[in-house]
Amino acid sequence: MNAKSSTSVKLVLLGEAAVGKSSLVLRFVSNDFQENKEPTIGAAYLTQRCTINDRTIKFDIWDTAGQERFASLAPMYYRNAQAALVVYDITKPQSFIKARHWVKELHEQASKNIIIALVGNKYDVVENEEEGSEDSKRKVSIEEGKQLAKDEGLLFFESSAKSGFNVNEIFMAIGHKIPDTSAGAASVNDNRNSERVDLTVNNDSPVNGNANCGC
Amino acid sequence: MSFLSALRSKVSELGLFDQANAEKKPSRDELFRDEFHLPESQTIQIDSAAEVSLHYNETAKNSQDFSSPTTSPLVNGESHVNHNDVFWSGRLFLTEQYLIFKDGFNGRDFNFTIHLSTIRKVERLPSKSYVFGLIITTFSGLRLTIQFIGIRSNSERFSLLLKKSLDTNLGCVKQLKPFLKTLYSEYLMFKNSPAGQDSDLQIPAGGLGLMFKFPGNTKKLRDKSKMRLWFEFMKVNGRNLNIVKQEMFYKLIRVGLPNRLRGEIWELCSGSIYSRYENIGIYQQILDDNADKTSIAIEEIEKDLNRSLPEYAAYQSDEGISRLRRVLTAYSWKNPDVGYCQAMNIVVAELLIFMSEEQAFWCLCTLCDKYTPGYYSKTMYGTLLDQRVFEALVEKTMPILWEHITHNDIQLSIISLPWFLSLFINSMPLVFSSRIIDILFLQGPRTLFQVALAIMRVNGEKLLKTTDDGSFIQVIKNYFGKLDESAHPTSKNETYRQITNFQELLVVAFKEFQDITNDTVKSYRRKHKNSVFSNIESFIKRTQIRNLPKLPNLDTNNLSNIYDRFYQVLETDNIQKGTGSSLMNFEQFEKFLSQITGWVIVSNVADSKNQEEFLHRLFVSWDSEFQGGLALSDVAIGLNKWTYNDLMSMIKTFFDLYDSTGSGYIDKEGMLQMSEGIIYLTRPLREGWVFDSITQREIDQVIAKRMNEYKKLLAENPDNEDVISPPNLTVDEQFYRHRQGERYLSAASKFLQNCFSYARPEQEIDELKTEDHLISIHDDDRKSDYGELATEEYIDEKDKKKSQSLKANKALDPDHPLAMDLPTFRMVILADESYELFFGEILASSIDINKPIKNAQSHFNIRNMFDTLVADGRKVANEVRRRIDDVQSITSPTASTFKRSRATSSASKHQASVDEEEDDDFISSDVGTTDTDLLKGAEVNVLNESKDNAKEKEASSA
Ligand SMILES: Nc1nc2c(ncn2[C@@H]2O[C@H](COP(=O)(O)OP(=O)(O)O)[C@@H](O)[C@H]2O)c(=O)[nH]1
Ligand SMILES: [Mg+2]
């Protein structure tokens, strides 16, 4: 049997209220989508294991919740996170502004090598819209997201917790970027290459391609 | 509400807290109120040592006749002192409305809190007795004998004051009866009295539990036995507003309160019953007063109503949801600084199971104030602080576990946060969390820490085996699920086996961690406050600065300084006014600008009118939301506009300030005001407080000229260097000051002349405008643009002045109104050398936002204010020096010759060998050799005197 290595990754979700953080986690952890009624005080903790290239990665997920004022608690949550999902809602421009804020905050305050994925959620809402249609529900273009990701060196995805589109891919991409602590020698570059390959292979969603850009 | 505005309010709130907590010692009254949970209104009137005994009066035991108030408070009655009664010695206190006693042993063996309105009779102990004493009877039959200890006069005074207070409280007695109807204890006592058996007494309004069943199994909870014990207790010791607390009282609470009495005992222990009694009807009034209003808090409350203990039946009904909504809403109006914070919904949902709305409302107020300070604030500083305190306590009491936690990077504070924030309500089943709250209200905030620590201790072994957040949380989750199971399921001992996990938890919490007192908590909070606060502060500052729009003229450093100054100016005033505003008002704006500009002078007497007008104009133009106050972003955006480094942008900024309607044109009135504005801004230059670069250049040239002449002389007379004086490097400042003033005065008059001659008739412009399909702006509209500032007076003044100047100046002939556009204004400015310089360089540099706040604390003075400009002046001066040095180095052979020969000559003169080294040091040289002219020169010299400089002078004198 392969000498499988196991790594656990502390991951925190940040973003404006109601962009779909909890839904993304629920989709990833239980492959489910539902209105969650559970009031979360502070943050909810969930875990999910997945295997990437013979490597078992255990995600310890802190899903932050709550009102605006809970933002001052955020440093407590991202303090020693190795990865972060900064989520916005592609139909809410304000949530993108806030995402920008979170990215900066993480870069300035979180641990140096934190892996950040920028996620524009609720893709399903605009999925069937014609490109560039007048009354599109989309308020944040994919280019804006890509640009921010490029400027700040982030992974970038548009996703839908509702349809499941790209949800696993986000976590996979993060998993790929996590250095293999037990193997030690595995280089970051190798991981990068395999990430691209994996994403293309795994991406069986009908609207693939343009939405993911592993920067 | 935007993120930004939310954070803005956080900052102001934080400032408030920080300063309010500047470690001022609480007063005796504050400590007293805290100890006895009394409202703010109470202060100690008098206190005395006393011995007290409780005498159970059989005849009054079930009397419900509390309608007859104290009519004759002091009567000499027969002796009631039963010598079998136990006397407790301690201290007796009288406040405006309460009589309070505390035993001298531990304050818990025997104490009472009696509202004066419950006292029905006060009798004096027979005078034959050698002690001075009183017998007090309350409506519920409580009969207390009080014997004063100490000097007689104090005892007499006490009883006199008591009599007075009873008289002033007669009014309250009317309120007592209806208030008692809201208390379950009264209902309980009356129901079980002979009179109550056949009366149709109504249950007081209470918690939702009365309608929807209380959580848990009342049989199993043994509510009936608990109720009977309370009944017996209250028969003897009184209740609610007149109660004696002895050991039994605390025991009864520790075993868990009976559901029906729970709400009342909560409000009794927390003291919120006293606030409620003092504020009868206020709850309803707050709701009525705000009935039609909406707020962000209300929106947020609405979202959470269905997520507050949804498993409890009442919260699946309209009744429960509406009560919850009303209490949370009322609180958000009562305390807008907090508004609504998630988790309050859960806490209030719990309170409402056992309490009426009004009870829950006052209880929530007390809870937020005294038990969970700052937990729900906009920064949640209290929550963050207490998590830090909790971690510190774990570290201290369980070092091995703490070591394990840190080693494995387990985020304890995140795990414990919901326990504190929602008082364990969401973490464990309601029957258990209710019992923790029983004790919380009894013992204060330490309870939360004791229970949290006990959870760690009880699960210690298992927790030491976990290595990540997940398994750590799982251990605790499992434990919370088994609280009703036996703690020792395998024990052979039957009673041992019956102890549940929950009971064990309480024992560990209150026995093992009994050393964790409220004072421990307080001192830990003090210790960690600064670091927690500065973390929050820097988080908020980062966020606010990041949220500002991109401002090309301001770097992060500038923004940081602006931020600091903004809130510094705001905070000092917030403390005074007690508001949590994050907007800068006009006075603050003036103060703010006085710190960073060269032209604003607080209490500017000489130029107050011009300053006032200019600043008001500036203030209004920066107030982007028209809210009568400037937000941080307004100030940053405004300052950005006024710190352009190029002439054209500054001219436009200034033009826009006067073109308040954005029409692109300035009328005659506007031109006059512009002129006044520039006159105001250039005052420092006009008065010669500082030289502009034109003046500096002139000075520079004069000095350079002298230098050249000197050089020429030297060159022409290489042998006579001794007799040639080096040039005077000082100038007559007064002369240049005056000259500069004249220049600016003439610039001012030239400005107006030019305005009027270059501006076009308004008619033309109107035509132009219609051609361009621009909306024409009427004069009236423009006036209204002075906005709220346009007081009658202001306009009148303006009009008067206008007509005066109109008469004086032909150009202002009202029959030919003029208007000026930006290009014209630009031309007018560029037509004048001084004004061009002013807009191109001086104006921007007269605003200094580079100075961090620390260096600017000193009081305002003119020197300070012109620091920037003076520094610029110095730069010019240094420039002159540099040029002189250049001259010297170019002619270095000459210079060195000069130097050497001078040394020789001075040596010969003084008949002594003078070291060149020493020679450099002019202070050590003989004063007598320096003539008075030279001294004069040194006095007025604006240039930095250097050694070379002095050396030259010395040489010249030699
Ligand atoms: N259409 C759509 N709705 C979503 C999606 N993800 C979440 N939602 C909805 O958005 C709302 C907020 O979701 P939630 O996960 O609670 O957001 P959170 O506050 O960021 O945790 C809920 O009503 C979700 O059902 C998505 O991908 N598509
Ligand atoms: Mg959520």
Image: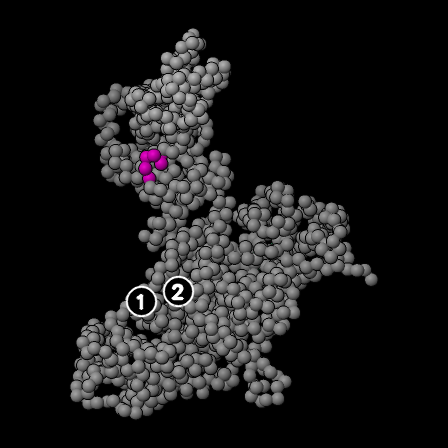
The amino acid type, in three-letter code, at marker 1 is Arg
- Residue B648 visible to an observer of this rendering: no
Looking at the image, residue B180 lies above or below residue A144: below
Q: Nearer the viewer, residue B577 or B758?
A: B577
Q: Going by the image, does A164 lie left or right of B897? A: right
Q: Which of disc 1 and disc 2 is earlier in sequence?
A: 1
Marks 2,1: beta carbons within 8 A: no
Q: Going by the image, does B94 lie left or right of B843? A: left
Of all chains, the one bearing label 1 is B
Name the residue that disc number 2 marks: B369
The numbered dot on residue B28 is 1
Measuring 53% from the left and 69% from the top, which residue is drawn there? B397
Measuring 51% from the left and 55% from the top, which residue is drawn there? A71
Task: Report the span colored magenta.
Answer: B860-865
Snapshot quadrant of residue B909: top left
Q: State whether label 2 is within 8 Å of ligand 2.
A: no
Looking at the image, residue B898 lies above or below residue B467: above
Snapshot quadrant of residue B870: top left
Q: Residue furthest toward the top?
A: B716
